[in-house]
Every structure is written in structure tokens, then in C-alpha cells.
Amino acid sequence: MILARLLRIFCGIFAVISAAYSQPLTLKQAIDNALANYPSIRVSQEKIKAAAAGIELARTAYLPRIDILAQENRATRNNIFGTLLPQSVIAPITGPVQSANYSGVWDSALGGLITWEPFDFGAREASVNAANSLRAQQQATLKRTQFEIAAATADAYLTVIAAQATVRAAQAGVDRAETIAKTIKALVDATLRPGADESRAQAELAAAKTQLIQANQAVEVARANLAQFLTLEPAQITLAPQAFSQLPPMENAAPIDTSANPVSQEQNAVIEQLNARLKILERSYFPKFALQGAAFARGTEPWIDTPNYAIGFTVTFTASDIYALRARKEQQSAEIRAEQARYQQIAVELKARWNAAVAALNGARGVAANTPVQISSAKAASDQANARYQSGLGNVDAVAESQRLLTQAEIDDALARLSVWRALLQIATAAGDLVPFVTEVSQ
């Protein structure tokens, strides 16, 4: 009973999923699916979270530092007068000078030190700003990644539509070739035409079927390419090609603003982040001021019996850092200039891509306006060739040639309209905004 109920539930879920998959996938749905699931987008999102955590880390520099130490050891008690330069090898020792004695004594120590930097000439603020600029850079990277994935998904979608249009035209060619082959066979059987004509017709039919097979192969390859951006298997992808069957309205492309492209915005964020890091270097060559308070106690036995406290104001300054900082600032400045040059290069490349896309759009519109004439003429030529052949005035070569011309004309006509849409997509990609294109397709 329970097994039967579970089986009915599973079948219901499977039916719902199958129905959802069988619905044609619009371009907007494909893009939304890719933006929600493509792995590289999640990588960028996690990097933004890491950058946000880096901001909090930079802000902790404003907090006082608290160090606590507890120690128990056994060592000799010998001591001498004099000083010892700061180092990390010889252990410090306190107390009066004793005669040489190598017996051990227990030492105990417990203490705490609070250090706070009241002002720093903007060094900590520069670090926080650098962390903020890093997060802004990661956000710009996310937007660029989302845009590139959306553009690639749209291009893959159009590729599938174009391949399917080729299949439809190739299938029509196969249907016509089969009709002609049957007609010629009947004429050959009636001894009205030589057997060579039937062989030629079968060869043309085989060639048309080969073209259809290749077109179907192109569809499967294009569908697999689209599937990599979606959460569907290639066999589950069904598209809605109706929007691309008509030409879009004749409109001039809006002038391009290269700074609005996500690629340019990401590069600008890189420059801002490098400038923020340069600010850190510019705020590094200053004295370090620290308010310090300490409380500690020591003992020469396991008990701590000698307490002390200290309050002070410490100033430290490493004058020799000027040479290293100067070199690092020069290095950072050179990196900034390099990224600024790259920003200009991106602008030039985007403008060139936009110009090429506009030229492609104009050419595609011209071709799309001409292909209906090509189809009409090819169809008339095919009808005339068939009529002449059946009346005994033509030969099979003319029929075969007219059939190939008609099939190619139908393919060219279907692809011409899609070429207009693809050129519009290229313009939108160069401009950095796919919303107008997706809106036009959805109408």
C-alpha cells in the first residue's frame, strides 16, 4: 500500500517535471537560468563575501591591542650589569648581580599589555578604503561575469535557433527530392525516361538526406553548447523560435558609451583599487604613536609576589624605510599607469566591436530584404524545370540544380533574419546592455 502510494507520488512529480521541461524555453528564461546556476558566478559571489570580511578585518586596526602573558620557568639566577641590544636569541633577566651560581630557581610571571594608536595620519583609514575598493572591484567582476554569461547564453540560444532553421529547410529539400524521385521512377518504369535519370534522382535524394543529417548534427552540438549554461540536459532543451521568425523594427543603434560596459567598469574598479593601495603607501612613512598600559607581576619562586604597573606613550619611527617605500610607490604607480592604458585599450576594442556589429547589422538587413526575392525566383525556376522535365523538354540536371538552389535559398532566408538578430545582440554586447535586446525579443 505504502509502496503504491510512493509510486504514484513519484509519477506525479515526474509528470510535473516533464511538463516543465517540455515547455519552450524563452531567451529570458535561458539567461535567468544561466545567471542563477553557472559556477563562475558563484565564484565571484564568494569573492565578494571574502572582500566584505576583509573590510571588517581592516577596521579592527582601530581597536586597542591586548596582549596577555603567563609564564613559569626554572633557570639560573646569575646576572651582570650592562645593556643588551634588542634581539630574539638571548633571554632577558632582571635582579641584582649575584656571584656565579649555577643552581636553578623557579621564576613566575603574569602580565597584560594594552596598546592603542590614537592617531596614524590616515594609515588605518587608507587600509579600510583599500578593503572597500577591493569589494567594489569584486562586485564589478561579478557584474562583468554575469554580463558575459548572459551574452554567451544568448549567442548559444541564437545558434540553436539558426541550426533548427537549417534543419527545417533541409527537411523541405528532402521532401521535394523524394517527390521528384518518385515522379522520375514512374517515368522510368513507363519507359518514358532513361534509367540514368532515376539513378541521378536517387543520388540527389541521398545528398539531401546527408545535408539533413548534418543539419541535425549541428542542432545537437548547438544544444549541447547551450546546455552548459543551464541546469538542463541537451535533450530536455526546447526553444521558442517564434520571436526570431520576423525582422526587428528598423532603428538606428544608439551611440556607444564604452564606460557603461561592465568590462570597462571592472577595469576602472581595478584602477581604483590600485590607487587605494597607493594611498596606504603614502600614509606609511610617519612615526607610530602608541598609548600603552601594562600590569605585571613576577616572583622568584612558584608564587607571584612582586607586582608592578606602567603607563606610557611610545613613538617609533623607522627612518630607513623611506627607500623601500619610495621604490614600492614607484612600482605601484607604474601598475596604475599600465591598468589605465589597459582601460583605454578596452575602450578602443569595444568601439571597434560596436562599429563592426553596426556594419554587420546593415549588411544583414540588406541580405534579409533580398532573400525573399531569391526564394521566389528559385521556386519559379524549380517549378519550370519540373514542368519542362515532365513534358520531355528538359533534363534531370536542370531539375536537380533548381532543387538545390531552392533549398539553399530557403536556408539563406531563414539565416538572414537570424543574422539581423545576431547583429543586434553583438551591438548590445559591445554596448554592455542586453536588456533592450531581450525586451525586443520578448515582444
Image (spheres, grey):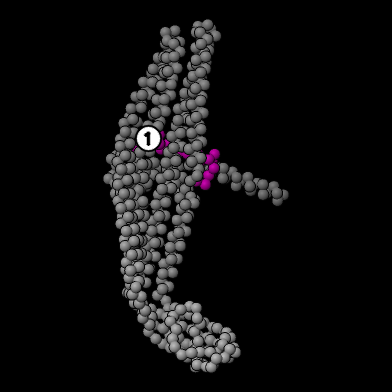
Give the residue at x 36% y 51%: 263
Q: Residue at x 42, y 76 (%)?
A: 63
- The quarter of the picture where residue 311 lies is bottom left
Q: Is residue 172 visible?
A: yes
Locate residue 284, reporting x and y percent. 34, 71
Q: The C terminus lies in which quarter of the figure?
A: top left
Outermost residue on the front side: it is 100
Q: Position of residue 298 (x, y in %)?
A: 52, 89
Identity of the residue furthest to the top in this view = 191
Q: Which stretch appears magenta?
A: 230-248
Residue corresponding to mark 1: 419
Classify 317 as above or below 428.
Answer: below
Camera-nearest residue between 49 and 409: 49
Tell whether 331 sits left or right of 56: left
> Can residue 436 be seen here?
no
What secondary structure do most residues of the magenta stretch adopt?
loop
Secondary structure, mark 1, is helix
Query: What percent of the width, then of the height, locates residue 26?
Result: 45, 42
Residue lying at 72% horizontally and 49% vertically, measured from the top left: 1
Where is residue 130 shown, x and y percent of the image? 37, 65
Q: Is residue 12 left or right of residue 209?
A: right
Q: Is-magenta flag for residue 250?
A: no
Q: Nearer the viewer, residue 229 or 118?
A: 118
Residue 241 among those drawn in magenta: yes
Image quadrant where residue 280 sits: bottom left
262 relative to 307, above or below: above
Residue type (three-letter) at the residue carrying disc 1 = Ser
